[in-house]
Image: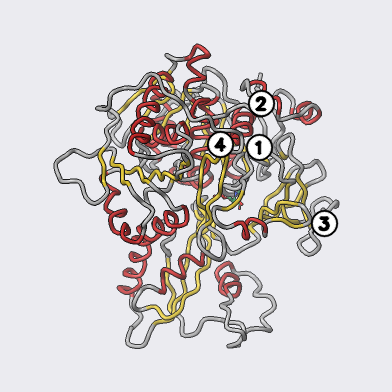
Amino acid sequence: MSNIGSYEDRLKNFSWSIAEKELGYNPGDTINIGWYCTDRICQMGKADKTALIWEGREEDNMRKYTFNDLRILTNTFGTFLRKVGISDGDRVCLFMDKAPELYIGFLSILKIGAVAQPLFSAFGDESLFVRLENAGTKAIITSRKHASKVQKILDRLPDLEYIIVVDDDGKKALKNKEIAFSLDQATPVDQFEIFPTKAESNSVLHYTSGTTGQPKGVKHVHYSLISQYLTAKWVLDLQDDDIYWCTADPGWVTGTSYGIIGAWSLGITQCVKDSGFAAETWYRFIEKHKITMWYSAPTAIRSLMKAGDEVIKQFDHSSLRHLASVGEPLNAEAVVWSQKVFGLPFLDTYWQTETGSMMITNYPGMKIRPGSMGKPFPGLTCALLDPDTYEPIHETNKPGLIAFQFDWPARMRTYWNNQETFEKKFKNGWYITGDRSTIDKDGYFWFIGRDDDVINTGGHLVSPFEVESALLEHEAVAESAVVSKPDDINMEVVKAFVTLKPGFVASQELELEIMNFIRKKLSPLAMPQEIEYIDLLPKTRSGKIMRRVLHAKEWGEEIGDISTLEND
Ligand code: PRX
């Protein structure tokens, strides 16, 4: 029997107080996610249950932590952070690979009432800089490998006081503002005073990219736990004896909402593999740890499909009982394929950094229509809006903007230091997601696409504006326009059109140099996979670059109205 039972029955009797009651939370109480994921699970008699099975790049580099270990280690890390001078409300960035310290550090930041700001360790110094500057980050927790990127931008970050290095071997002198902290060597702290955060206290700050402007810091609060707990329970169907694997990096909201909070607040054993994608490695991981529930993403699933079915047969995956996916459209073929090879379909889930928890999903036991995102989670008021009037559309199969009444617990509270952009997300009292969909006659949602220029590559949002700005910093680039181009695995990848400054000659060598420049400055995902030299960029008469024209060309689509094109 699945946790949700009948979706239709849940719709009828739904209230978020179901989660509040199960968590023993009464409105007005203190609510601290760090406590809920560690101390409370121990108090429920699961202190000795395994919370985390961590495996490094090499298979034999493995560690296990019980919920009591998590409790003590988060107390220990929290005590250190407090001693250093970090207190409630301070922003503390986590910038490292998927080491145990990332997970423990995250919860310890929450336990002291500070705000956790996880960022991908693959970020280059410029990506890192804009996010730390915007948040006014006070401390960054990192590893030796990534600390040099922080050093590079330190003099431009007056608010950044501490660089906490969790794996310093003492061989070299610590650099400016660096402090070493070793979880293994610190004195374990059993008793710890957790900061009494309330429902609306800030918890997590995730950065996401939009079409224009700098990345936006999506502000979440401790009350988000209510949605994350219940969606993890009903959609991921996590049950006491599950061994759960969320493949997402906590630099991405999936890696925190469901790779930390959802599962641990339910007292579930989680596995983490600190390495990139490789089909054999992943299948071996599932076999070795007897994973039962697997939450992944379409790009990974498509990569597994590409690796072929032969490799699957070399491993035992009979432990799997439930699969789900998030981040990009999950094509029907992928669902059909997973049913064939694992005997289970991947259930698609749709949500956003801003929503904090799952919004439209398929449920265990519900009849799946491959290619559909499913139906709204109980308690949500969802509609498709007409893009011109922002009024709900009532006809079936008619495309509209996905919108929600802004009232579920895990919704963002604002964009950090950017209330103006936050307010622009609302029309006629609806929160506009920026995605388009249709709804069929039975209420299933079918994703169409984004309503802006943001590129979703392998599930990660890349702002064309950010890449264009970075391109302009290269000495050879005069102007640039960035769009997506189709890709079999990542669905879409970044493509840049550039005009060169006088004295620079188009060449393959220069293309590689520019690509590498962006990879280092921003990230491997933001790096254009192709650079096309162009004499003139299509512009409107007022001088605005018409990305739409370039995009249409890449996707073989109709170019549409170009009457405002300057150079036609
Ligand atoms: O465009 C939608 C796409 O990813 C966007 C949100 O990205 P992000 O904030 O990085 O959060 C991703 C993880 C929750 C959405 O606006 N997206 C997400 N899930 C799906 C999706 N597109 C299609 N199908 C999905 N299941």
Q: Which residue is pictured at 71% across the width and 23% down the height? A: 5
Q: How many marks?
A: 4
Residue, disc 3:
391
Question: Quick one: which residue is furthest to the top in this view?
Answer: 45
Which quadrant is the C terminus positioned in? bottom right
The numbered mark at residue 211 is: none
Q: CA distance from mark 4 to mark 3?
A: 38 Å
Classify 550 as above or below 394: below
Residue, disc 1:
409
Could you say whether the residue bearing mark 3 is in a helix, strand or loop? loop
Could you say whether the residue bearing mark 1 is in a helix, strand or loop? loop
- Residue 210's x, y, as percent? 56, 60
Labels 4 and 3: the sequence-earlier one: 4
Could you say whether the residue bearing mark 2 is in a helix, strand or loop? helix
**Callout 4: few (<14), some (14-19), or many (20+) C-alpha neighbours within 10 Å?**
some
Which of labels 4 and 2 is toward the front?
A: 2
- Name the amino acid, label 2: Ala
Tell me if residue 298 can be seen: yes
Could you say whether the residue bearing mark 4 is in a helix, strand or loop? helix
